[in-house]
Amino acid sequence: QVQLVESGGGLVQAGGSLRLSCAASGSRVGFNTLGWGRQAPGKQRDLVATISRAGTTNYADSVKGRFTISRDNAKNTVYLQVNDLKPEDTAVYYCYAQSIHSVYFWGQGTQVTVSS
């Protein structure tokens, strides 16, 4: 059974930084694409960043230059370094994992709140 557990969220002032982590388990062969999405109150969930098994990354325009996604394949863990946070970055951040059968799994989310 695949499980994704996020950690690292919290309350931070504008301009601050956080490092989000997500440990994925339940697959002996690991995962293909890993990524992060976020959902602000009253809004749809949007993708923020993705990283392939080989390390190719993609970012939403709104976070380019401020967020960095990375992964440790040996640990099946994906990270999101978030810098220069803005109040509009306030959201629940969810990690996701794509299995080798192209099934997507989502974590329960971690709250990031940025105060102005």
Image (tube, rainbow, N blue to C red):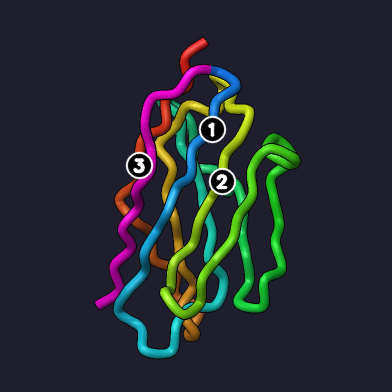
| Mark toward the start of the polypeptide (2 vs 1) | 1
Q: Which residue is mark 3?
A: 110
How many numbered discs sit on the rendered protein?
Answer: 3
Residue 39 in the image: state x and y as whole percent. Answer: 46, 37
Quarter where residue 70 is shown: bottom right
Question: At x 60% / y 55%, what residue is drawn?
Answer: 69
Residue occupying the far left of the picture: 1
Question: Badge 2: few (under 14), some or many (20 or more) residues near its Cα, within 10 Å?
Answer: some
Residue 110 in the image: state x and y as whole percent. Answer: 35, 42
What SS does tag 1 mark? loop
Q: Which residue is mark 2?
A: 81
Is residue 65 on the magenta stretch?
no
Q: Which residue is mark 1?
A: 17
Question: Badge 3: few (under 14), some or many (20 or more) residues near its Cα, within 10 Å?
Answer: many
Residue 85 in the image: state x and y as whole percent. Answer: 58, 27
Question: Badge 1: few (under 14), some or many (20 or more) residues near its Cα, within 10 Å?
Answer: some
